[in-house]
Image (cartoon, rainbow, N blue to C red):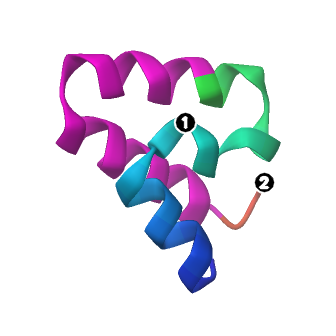
Amino acid sequence: MNFFRVLLSIICPPLAVLDKGCGSIFIVFLLWLCGWVPGIIAALIILNNPKR
């Protein structure tokens, strides 16, 4: 997880997880619509997952 991805997840979380798959983008987008903070948290969790 580099600085650019963290900054992008704060500004626009769905763009930060663009290469992680359609399901991740959809989940982060829905959480981002519900509130800015849940979208950021979900994006950071997905980006911090070493398995993907």
Magenta region: which residues? 26-49
Rendered position, 38 above or below 34? below
What residue is pinned by disc 2?
Answer: 52
Q: Residue furthest bottom?
A: 3
Residue 3 placed where, x, y %? 55, 84
The quadrant of the rendering that contains the N terminus is bottom right
Instruction: Please tell me the numbered disc located at residue 14.
Output: 1
| Residue nearest the viewer, comparing 9 with 24 | 9
Residue 31 colored magenta?
yes
Residue 28 placed where, x, y %? 47, 30
What kind of secondary structure does the magenta stretch mostly adopt?
helix
Rendered position, 7 above or below 46? below
Left or right: residue 45 compared with residue 49: left
Label 2 vs 1, first from the N-terminus? 1
Left or right: residue 17 compared with residue 14: right
Left or right: residue 27 compared with residue 23: left
Q: What's the residue type where badge 2 is placed? A: Arg
Q: Residue at x 75, y 21 (%)?
A: 22
Name the quadrant containing residue 49: bottom right
